[in-house]
Image (spheres, rainbow, N blue to C red):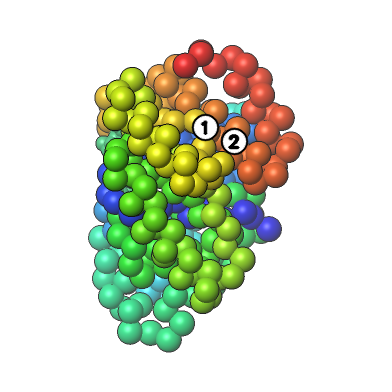
Amino acid sequence: MAQKIAILSQKGGTGKTTAVRTLADVLRRTGLRVLAVDLDPQGNLSDYFDVPPDAAPTIGDVLAGRAKAPAAVHPAPDAGEPPGPAVHVVPANLSLAEAELLLAGKMGRELTLRKALKLVDADHDIVLIDCPPALGLLTVNALVAADFALLSSEAQYFALQGVEQALEVIELARDGLNPDLEWLGVFFNIADMRTVHSREAFDSLREHVGEKLFDTTIRQSIAYANSAERATSILDHRPDLGADYLRLTDELLGRLGLAAPRRRLKPLLADAPAA
Ligand SMILES: Nc1ncnc2c1ncn2[C@@H]1O[C@H](COP(=O)(O)OP(=O)(O)OP(=O)(O)O)[C@@H](O)[C@H]1O
Ligand SMILES: [Mg+2]
């Protein structure tokens, strides 16, 4: 059975999709079979992996009942070099917005993704679900399908507020359709920890959520926009920055209790440039 993780945030532009793209790459380098599900009609994740815009079927087709999930699993063109299995992607495009509307009028609308993913579960070790920047029906589908929720937070004073709102939605999923959903934690993304502002926001969040806040923060750099444009992993484009994601993955694997891939990450961490 795959461990399914929904990555979300209350706000847009907190680096969620970049996190899914990069975590997928780190995890595959530890030998895990990773499926990345694009659940955003913007289709950014599909772009970041360089999936052709006309790839079909997509997650929109799956949620609309026009296709089965296994048919929508595409190998990512920039899936990375061996060793490590290629990342698989279920892409999205604007048709997902239409599928969401269609879904809204249906019975069991919150369960659609969960049912769909059952068919691809056995072929993967980890499923990462990239949520859209809204806490609506698509995000609820992700939280009902997932075993874990992972929050990406902006490194700002408003971080706490955003985390609290996202936690309310996680709580709703738990109270209703997915009582086993576990909150993995929250990490600071696109952060400039040289500023007092960001450090204070970090400390304040730590006070409120304690160990749920990851020690690793993802540093802000223009290199991310460049690597996204080239559909290249930051691990290849700027290994010095990519080291942040190696450290985040190390913490993540610890929280997931996945000791073997965590051991396989050690040599990569040892080779990584210091922060
Ligand atoms: N660590 C970083 N430093 C600087 N820029 C970053 C970083 N991570 C991502 N970005 C850039 O920030 C922008 C938004 O990132 P991304 O698409 O990952 O965010 P998102 O939370 O998925 O956005 P949305 O809410 O629209 O889905 C992109 O241009 C991306 O390249
Ligand atoms: Mg996104």
**For the residue carrying disc 2, how many other residues have a C-alpha within 10 Å: few (<14), some (14-19), or many (20+)?**
some
Q: Nearer the viewer, residue 57 or 140?
A: 140
**Residue 100 occupies which quadrant of the picture?**
bottom left
In the rendered image, the vertical position of residue 190 relative to residue 73, given as above or below: above
Amino acid type indicated by mark 2: Glu
Where residue 94 appears, as percent x and y from the top left, is 25, 60
Amino acid type indicated by mark 1: Asp
Q: How many marks can you see?
A: 2
Where residue 143 appears, as percent x and y from the top left, is 48, 63
Where residue 17 appears, as percent x and y from the top left, is 37, 44
For label 2, the SS is helix
Query: Mark 1 or mark 2, which is nearer to you?
Result: 1
Would residue 210 be visible to someone looking at this image? yes
Residue in the image at 36% along x and 70% along y: 137
According to the picture, the residue beneath numbered tag 2 turns out to be: 251
Residue 230 appears left or right of 150: left
Q: Nearer the viewer, residue 170 or 118?
A: 170
According to the picture, the residue beneath numbered tag 1 turns out to be: 215
